[in-house]
Amino acid sequence: MNPDSIIAALFPPTCILCGAPGAIGRDLCDGCAAELPYNRHCCARCALPLDGPLPDGILCGLCQRRAPPYDRCIAALRYENPVPTLVGAAKFRGRLNAARLLGQLLTDRVRSEPGSWPQVLIPVPLHPSRLAERGYNQALEIARVLARELALPIENRVCERVAATAPQAGLDERARRRNIRGAFAARGPFDWHHVAILDDVVTTGSTVAELARVLRDAGARRVEVWAAARTP
Ligand SMILES: [Zn+2]
Ligand SMILES: [Zn+2]
């Protein structure tokens, strides 16, 4: 018996949401998987959830007014029930099985999208003080799943969070942009033509936009954002 099958026998997959046996080796049952709020109709550029599909080549109103500094955002889920429970478990309660499940769902979504893979995955870094407090970076834990499934390297040290910003929650978009400005520093110059930033939840997108700008300034040419969830 190999170590994976021993672990699977000792800890059979169990649905994080309802406790039923998990399906396809994941901690999610078929019933709960069918009910998840997948981000099916969304803006092709920023992944903003929409009520229905837009005509080909048409972006959401926000992107039409001001295109974000990343080329494309892929978000697997909408940040609606029960996704906040999964994200909260991954972020604040150290439930690595929740981070793994979010990573698996994001892998499914990325595989269904056209286009080439990035050369590297760059998880949104936490400030060292936040990392010390929490013990791990949930964006990195999600990135690990994609790295394994898609055979892509993680670059975890090329970019740091140099400012301990106030939490973005409760701020409007303009305040978020101001709050996050100057928060990241990259160890460029890079010769990457294509990278993907990994995050758990994209809200207004100001954090990933700031990081995308920093990576571009450091030489990355195509910057995507891959997120487990996107707020409507
Ligand atoms: Zn379930
Ligand atoms: Zn958009």
Image (cartoon, rainbow, N blue to C red):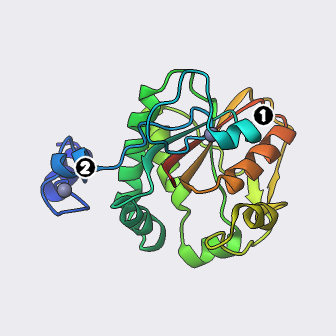
Marks 2 and 1: which is nearer the front?
Answer: 2
- Image x and y of residue 190, in percent: 81, 35
Q: What residue is shown at x 74% (from left), y 71% (from top)?
A: 165
- Image x and y of residue 177, in percent: 77, 60
The answer to whether 95 is drawn above or below residue 151 in the figure is below
**How dense is the environment of label 1, judged by Cα within 10 Å: few (below 14), some, or many (20 and up)?**
many
- Image x and y of residue 102, in percent: 40, 51
**N-terminal of the two: label 2 or label 1?**
2
Res 64 → quadrant: top right
Q: What residue is shown at x 39% (from left), y 68% (from top)?
A: 89
Label 1 CB-ligand 2 distance < 8 A: no
Q: Amino acid at mark 2?
A: Glu
Residue 77 as seen in the image, left or right of residue 202 = left
Query: Between residues 55 and 124, which one lies in front from this camera angle?
Result: 55
Which label number is shown at residue 35? 2
- Image x and y of residue 162, in percent: 80, 65
Residue 68 as seen in the image, left or right of residue 203 = right
Mark 1: which secondary structure? loop
Query: Between residues 221 and 72, which one lies in front from this camera angle?
Result: 72
Which label number is shown at residue 230? none
Query: Between residues 92 and 37, which one lies in front from this camera angle?
Result: 37
Q: Amino acid at mark 1?
A: Ala
Q: What residue is shown at x 73% (from left), y 64% (from top)?
A: 176
Task: Name the residue that disc number 1 marks.
Answer: 220
**How dense is the environment of label 2, judged by Cα within 10 Å: few (below 14), some, or many (20 and up)?**
few
Q: What residue is shown at x 71% (from left), y 51% (from top)?
A: 157
The answer to whether 140 is drawn above or below residue 149 in the figure is below
